[in-house]
Image: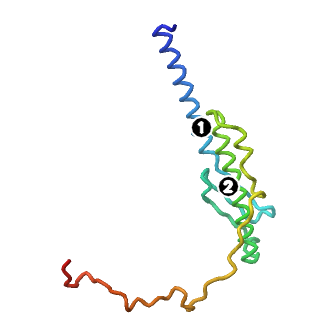
Amino acid sequence: MQTPDEWLADFEAKVADLQQKATEFKKNIESAGATERSPDGTVTVTVAPNGSLTDLHLTDDAMRKSAADLTAEILVTTRKARQRAASGVAEAFVPLGGDRAMVQRIPGAEDVAEPALPTRSRQAGTGEDDHDFADSPVIYKDDDVSW
């Protein structure tokens, strides 16, 4: 059985260890963002640890590509950056008792199916969303309506 002084010393050691791990975890999470560059170097994407886009750099050569090719290049490069960021975040949990196998289960950018780009764009004046609300009852602020 521990004496109160031994218990307190043990408790303080555990608290110090947790504080050190928390500081390391915070540093690892903050640095888990990722920057990826396209194979031809025309697109550079940076994402935050949560995968949100924080920077996009396009070279002059990138602007010479077709819109479809440039879009695809941006999406592929962004997926790669997000995958690296996700691996970094998962890796940050390992010192806290996280499962290293979790890092290996994160699919690579090449393993994720690319979503199909929309093939149909809405044309101006087609009337798809041009509803006429003339027959709808409308209440104006100045109406003398008593509820």
Q: Kindly report the distance in space between the C-alpha atoms of the residues bearing marks 2 and 1.
A: 19 Å
Q: In the rendered image, which residue does mark 2 sit on?
A: 82
Q: Nearer the viewer, residue 107 or 43?
A: 107
Q: Residue at x 74, y 44 (%)?
A: 104
Secondary structure state at the residue bearing disc 1: helix
Say above or below: 107 vs 70.
above
Secondary structure state at the residue bearing disc 2: helix
Say above or below: 10 vs 81.
above
Label 1 sits on what residue type? Answer: Phe
Residue 31 rendering spot, x and y as whole percentages: 63, 45
Label 2 sits on what residue type? Answer: Arg
Instruction: Locate the C terminus by quadrant.
Output: bottom left
Tell me if mark 2 has few (under 14), some (14-19) or many (20+) residues whose alpha carbon lies within 10 angstroms of its own.
many
Residue 66 rendering spot, x and y as whole percentages: 75, 77
Marked residue nearer the N-terminal end (2 or 1): 1
Q: In the rendered image, which residue does mark 1 sit on?
A: 25
Residue 84 rendering spot, x and y as whole percentages: 71, 51
Q: Quadrant of residue 65?
A: bottom right
Say above or below: 14 vs 62.
above
Q: Residue at x 67, y 55 (%)?
A: 82
Say above or below: 142 vs 27.
below
Label ID, residue 53 = none
Residue at the right extreme, as displayed: 40
Q: With 68 as the anchor, is 146 left or right in this view?
A: left
Q: Residue at x 55, y 28 (%)?
A: 18
